[in-house]
Image (cartoon, rainbow, N blue to C red):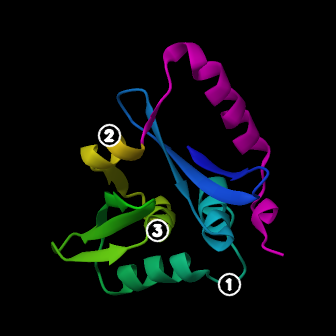
């Protein structure tokens, strides 16, 4: 769904939503990763490639594709992810980096049911108006809002 800054802590988070179902998964992330995700969602092309852009370019140069990203586990509030490549190779990664790369490559993002059971938040249909407010916020936010000072 996007990134936002949680107040009053000023901590960025990325919010994922189940494709079918009513659960959302908030993951606290760093300011740099929030900017990288916001750039990808807004189609911002920086004058020089950011790390995730570079990684996408390297994958292309090597003829390798990112098949999918899997959010595999959450332990003590720390989320874990795996990058799955078309060759079958899997690489452990932070979810924030994984999501930023998936957005650039058009790869799907999957989440283990156990992670959604533990950390997912159900938002009943009657509370969808709150989610709509969040969507409106996402339309207004810019990557510069995540600049760490």
- Mark 3, Cα crowd under 10 Å, few <14 / some 14-19 / many 20+, is many
Count of all numbered marks drawn on residues in the image: 3
Q: Name the residue beneath numbered marker 1.
A: 48
Relative to the observer, which residue lies in front, 29 or 145? Answer: 29
Few, some or many residues within 10 Å of mark 1 (<14, 14–19, 20+)? few
Q: Which residue is mark 2?
A: 117
Q: CA distance from mark 2 to mark 3?
A: 25 Å
Image quarter in which the N terminus is found: top right
- Compare marks 3 and 1 and give the one earlier in the sequence: 1
Residue 145 within the segment the image draws in magenta: yes
Q: Is residue 68 left or right of residue 136?
A: left
Quarter of the image where one finds residue 119? top left
Q: Earlier in the sequence, mark 2 or mark 3?
A: 3
Image-based side of 148 in relation to 48, left or right: right
Direction from residue 76 to residue 40 in the image, left or right: right
Q: Which residues are magenta?
A: 120-149
Vertically, is 87 above or below 133? below
Separation of marks 3 and 1 at Cα, in angstroms = 16 Å
Q: Secondary structure at mark 3?
A: helix
- Residue 62 in the image: state x and y as whole percent: 31, 86
Q: Nearer the viewer, mark 1 or mark 2?
A: 2
Q: Which residue is mark 3?
A: 101
């Amino acid at each position: 769904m996007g990134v936002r800054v949680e107040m009053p802590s000023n901590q960025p988070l990325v919010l994922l939503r189940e494709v079918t179902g009513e659960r959302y998964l908030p993951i606290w992330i760093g300011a740099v990763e929030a900017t990288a995700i916001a750039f990808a969602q807004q189609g911002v092309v920086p004058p020089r490639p950011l790390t995730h852009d570079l990684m996408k370019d390297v994958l292309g140069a090597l003829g390798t594709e990112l098949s999918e990203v899997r959010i595999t586990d959450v332990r003590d509030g720390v989320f874990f992810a795996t990058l799955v490549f078309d060759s079958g190779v899997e690489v452990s990664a932070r979810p924030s980096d994984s999501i930023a790369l998936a957005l650039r490559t058009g790869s799907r993002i999957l989440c283990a049911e156990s992670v959604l059971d533990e950390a997912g938040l159900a938002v009943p249909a009657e509370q969808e108006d709150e989610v709509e407010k969040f969507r409106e916020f996402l339309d207004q936010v810019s990557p510069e809002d995540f600049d760490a000072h």
